[in-house]
Amino acid sequence: MRPPLRHTTGAATAAQGFASLLGWACAGGLAATVFFAPAHWFADALARATDGRAQLLEARGTVWRGSGVLVLTGGQGSTQSSRLPQRLGWTIGPQFSGGIGLAASASAQCCGDQAWQALVQPRWGGFDMQVRAPAWRLPAQLLQGLGTPWNTLGLQGQLLAQSEGLSIKSRAGRFDISGKAQLDILDARSKLSTLAPIGSYRLNFQGAGAARPTPSVALTTLQGALALTGDGQWAANRFRFLGRAAVADPQHEAALQNILNIVGRRDGASSIITIG
């Protein structure tokens, strides 16, 4: 016996067409949501990742291309804040050269002619990130927003920040950092001293390598009446730093007493700086 013939009715055809249309609409809506995701989603993610210490206010555009006002704070509940003089712009997009990843860049007309760039590639149990940061000049008072001790010092001057071959690898919550980064504090001034400037300083970051098993930093004085020196390193995901602040020119000792009392533990005419 032949099976009965099945006839597709007009209603069934319409239902199938509607279901197909609905599926495409949902897929298109999801793609549109991702493609046109508002910039404040990125700003919210940055604030959560930094515990509120870095924020992007007045965010405009999309997650993939936008701009905002960079604000630094002392974290949740802090009353201190400082902002970049001009808006910070960013771009984020897929990168397929050498593997799948995301390429990001940040630019600010007030600070540098070239954008800072980062390439992030997912790896089993973590990620790899390469950073390219040409020299940027930033106002030193931007640090005051981070709270103690920067707001107490009332630091002013210029920051010159740059990196070379900086690479970060994360595996199962552990980080390996290689490459170099440098931060200069130029013509530094402080509200705690009538002497202006008090000096210029350099903080060198050196990632781990064959000769140095853990990342380290070195603080040196480029010039000035207040001499700052010190060394620090990361061990077991903890940072330790030991440094010294001293008067390089005795005739300015009185003008630097307040700073010496604040930055560390007094040791005669100098102060011992310890972190960690």
Image: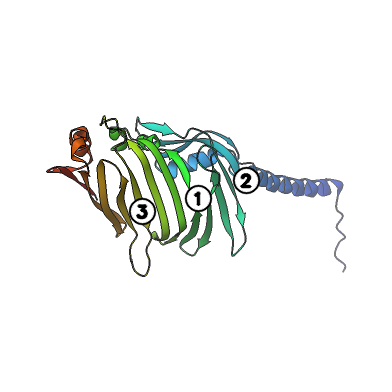
In the structure shown, which secondary structural element does the residue marked by tag 1 occupy? loop
Q: Amino acid at mark 2?
A: Val
Q: Amino acid at mark 1?
A: Pro
Query: Depth check: 157 or 88 in front?
Result: 157
- Identity of the residue drawn at 64% across and 41% down: 36
Name the residue furthest left: 268
x and y, in percent, of residue 261 in the image: 18, 37
In the structure shown, which secondary structural element does the residue marked by tag 2 occupy? helix
**Do the residues bearing badges 1 and 3 touch, measured as CB atoms within 8 Å?**
no
- Identity of the residue drawn at 36% across and 53% down: 204
Q: Quadrant of residue 148?
A: top left
Mark nearer the N terminus (1 vs 2): 2
**Do the residues bearing badges 3 and 2 touch, measured as CB atoms within 8 Å?**
no
Mark nearer the N terminus (1 vs 3): 1
Which residue has dot 2 on it?
Answer: 34
x and y, in percent, of residue 62 in the image: 60, 40
Labels in figure, total: 3
**Label 3, residues with CA under 10 Å away: few <14, some 14-19, many ≥20:** some
Numbered mark located on residue 204 in the image: 3
Numbered mark located on residue 256 in the image: none
Which residue has dot 1 on it?
Answer: 134
- Identity of the residue drawn at 38% across and 66% down: 209
In the structure shown, which secondary structural element does the residue marked by tag 3 occupy? strand
Query: Depth check: 267 or 239 in front?
Result: 267
x and y, in percent, of residue 146 in the image: 35, 37
